[in-house]
Amino acid sequence: MLCNEFEDRLTDYLDDVLQTDVHQTFAEHALRCPLCNETLSTVKSTMQACQAAGTLDAPRDLEARILLSTMPETAMTCEDFEERLTDYLDGFLPAPLYHRWERHSILCASCTELPGEVVRSIGACYTYIGEERPIPAGLNERILLATLGSRVPEEIRAPFGSRVASWLRRWLDPIISPQLATVATMLLVAVFVLTNTVSADGSISGVYSASLRLAEQGYTAGSTGGMKKITKGLKELVNGQPATPPAAPKQDSGNGQPKQPAKPNGAAQENRRNRS
């Protein structure tokens, strides 16, 4: 058997699938040829080492690289990664977004350290939140200089108009405020009473219409009877009852003329004269 033929049938020899005579010839050649014997020993040692070794863990970025090569549309951009960083840290990301987010954090070099930096910053904030830090020297003066243009608080004065308004408000507020409150209360009570008594529909326009009607009646009425009608109309507006039309003069059943009042007789007239 030649050496190249030995190498071609080496796998079949190790799997023990060769025929008996061929298997015997193969073994004799391995014993006679030092190179083939060394090759056979190396292959057997490698197979034993592979069988002894456990299952190898896949690299951490293997799945991410495979998906990036086969389905690039599922990859996440850096902007989406930063927008969903808070939800990821709070545990609110759904499963599909969670895996996409983790794959991007593995593949993107600029985003890999971002979650750790944010977590460390939050931890530092919680550490310093209970500590009272001293105010740096000159901080107040720098703030005054940057905002108002002066380091001395006494040099900062409000405008003249603001000072005058503040002075007037300080003197007039104790005097005007109670009086205005009283006047406003009286006006509210008056409006409430008028809208619930005089107004027909409970609105201010109804009060105005009622006042116009009363003014018109007062202008047209010039006698005592007219004043009585005005008074009666005002009472009807307050009570909400319609006005009662005046009774028509009674007519005589005979000729259709109004019945005249009976004249006093002579004796009655004489008695009145004597009394007077």
Image (cartoon, rainbow, N blue to C red):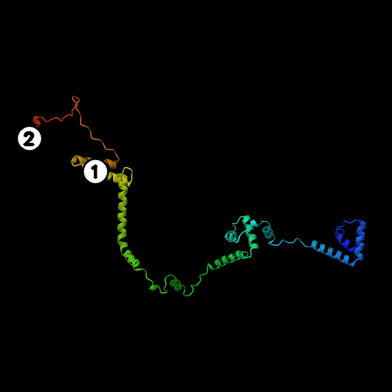
Depth order, front residue of 175/3: 3
- Residue 89: x and y in percent read 59, 60
> Taking 263 as reference, is 136 above or below it?
below
Q: Residue at x 30, y 63 (%)?
A: 172
Left or right of 24: which side holds 190?
left
Q: Amino acid at mark 1?
A: Glu
Are discs 2 and 1 less than 8 Å apart at CB? no
Label drawn at residue 273:
2
Q: Secondary structure at mark 1?
A: helix
- Residue 62: x and y in percent read 70, 61
Q: Amino acid at mark 2?
A: Arg
Tag 1 or tag 2, which sits nearer the N-term?
1
Residue pointed to by mark 1: 216
- Residue 185: x and y in percent read 32, 53
Mark 2 surroundings: few (<14), some (14-19) or many (≥20) residues within 10 A: few
Depth order, front residue of 82/6: 6
Q: CA distance from mark 2 to mark 1?
A: 44 Å
